[in-house]
Each structure stands twice: as structure tokens, then as C-alpha cells.
Amino acid sequence: MALTQQRKQEIISSYQVHETDTGSADVQIAMLTERINRLSLHLQANKKDHSSRRGLLKLIGQRKRLLAYIQNDSREKYQALIARLGIRG
């Protein structure tokens, strides 16, 4: 269920702002999106897993706050990020 170290490195390398970046808002949003997608698939198969559903809602809220931060900083960067991730803004 958790992200593998290799997958995390792939996400970090594709969304990082500079070469030593591992915690910028872009990277965090990409990691959260990957976790949300995996958890959504889990919940489609396990409809009664309410504790995982609660965790999913917490992840969505965290991603929403980070997206709001980026949107307040730069509208163009926000639009590019949500288009790249394939999420609704």
C-alpha cells in the first residue's frame, strides 16, 4: 500500500524545483496525489474500510491546502501543476 522508495524517487525527480529539492510544495502535492490515487483504488475494492476513508479525506484536505498555497503564490504555476497531475483545481 505504501509508496516504494523507487517510486518516491521517480516522483521527486520529475517534480523537483532544483536538484536537491525533496520537500517543496510541488513535490509534496505530487506525493499526496500518488497516495490518494492508490488509496482510492483500495477503497473501491474495500467499501467498508472507514478508517482508510478517513485517512483519504485527511490527505485530500492536506493537498487542498498546499494547492491553495501555490495558487496564492503563482496562478500560472498552479494551473500547470494541476494540468500535469490530472486533477481538478
Image: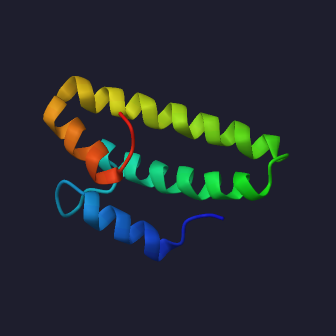
Farthest right residue? 48
Report x, y in % for residue 67: 35, 33
Is 31 placed left or right of 49 in the picture? left
Is 13 placed left or right of 3 in the picture? left
Name above or below for residue 86 compared with residue 6. Answer: above
Number of marks drawn: 0
Farthest bottom residue? 6
Is 8 placed left or right of 52 in the picture? left
Q: Quadrant of residue 22?
A: bottom left
Residue drawn where x is 44% and y is 31% of the image:
64
Instruction: State the quadrant of the C terminus.
Output: top left
Instruction: State the quadrant of the N terminus.
Output: bottom right
Report x, y in % for residue 76: 14, 35
Is 54 placed left or right of 66 in the picture? right
* 75, 20: nearer the viewer: 75
Residue drawn where x is 79% and y is 42% of the image:
51
Farthest top residue? 72
The way the protein has been coloured in the rendering is: rainbow
Report x, y in % for residue 25: 32, 42
Residue drawn where x is 27% and y is 47% of the image:
83
Report x, y in % for residue 55: 67, 41
Name above or below for residue 3 compared with residue 6. Answer: above
